[in-house]
Image (tube, rainbow, N blue to C red):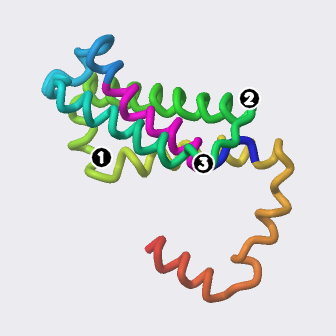
Amino acid sequence: NYVSIPVYSLIKSAGPVTMALIEEYYLPHLSPSRVPLNNTMYICFFMIFLGSAITAFDYVFITTTGVFWTAINLFSSIAYLLYMKYIIQKHGNVKKELGQFGVTFYNNLLSIPIFLVGMVLANESDHFERGPWTESTPFINQLAYVAL
């Protein structure tokens, strides 16, 4: 328990706002067909923050570690999304070749080794070995159905 959920939501709501501002002022060439920010959008950004702040008002629980890791999560997500926009713009036919879900599929596929290394380093492999798939045949059947 490093950060309460409403505070986490407040910090995470800064993601789309920060991304829009970075695209507007620092990287306008990434999305040439985008709509420039206007006053209505700024009001919406303010309302996002206000709603999250009102929600978090009574449930404020913050530690330095929690804010640090939430901020790392926020900025790494923004950097990842900006990088993906850059790659898609640079190689414009990527979306056409891979289809609607192809980019997401390959991004998730490439993240598996990272999660496996993290799992081993954090000594979480015993949780993986005792998962629901080891005891439950219906779970394995559902997993196979979804995979097909």
Give x and y (percent) for residue 117. Answer: 74, 42
Residue 6 magenta: yes
Q: Nearer the viewer, mark 1 or mark 2?
A: 2
Give x and y (percent) for residue 74. Answer: 53, 32
Residue type, label 2: Thr
Q: Residue 58 got which mark?
A: 3
Residue type, label 1: Leu
Secondary element at image label 1: helix
Position of 16 relative to 108 (above/below): above
The residue range painted magenta reads: 5-20
Please name the predominant secondary structure of the magenta segment in the image. helix
Q: Residue 98 got which mark?
A: 1
Residues tagged 3 and 2 counted as in contact (Cβ below 8 A): no
Q: Residues within 10 Å of mark 3 (few under 14, many from 20)?
A: few
Secondary element at image label 3: loop
Q: Residue 142 got which mark?
A: none
Q: Nearer the viewer, mark 3 or mark 1?
A: 3
Q: Nearer the viewer, residue 30 or 52?
A: 52
Look at 31% across and 27% down and name the residue there: 20
Mark nearer the N terminus (3 vs 2): 3
Residue 56 magenta: no
Q: Which residue is mark 2?
A: 64
Position of 30 relative to 41 (above/below): above
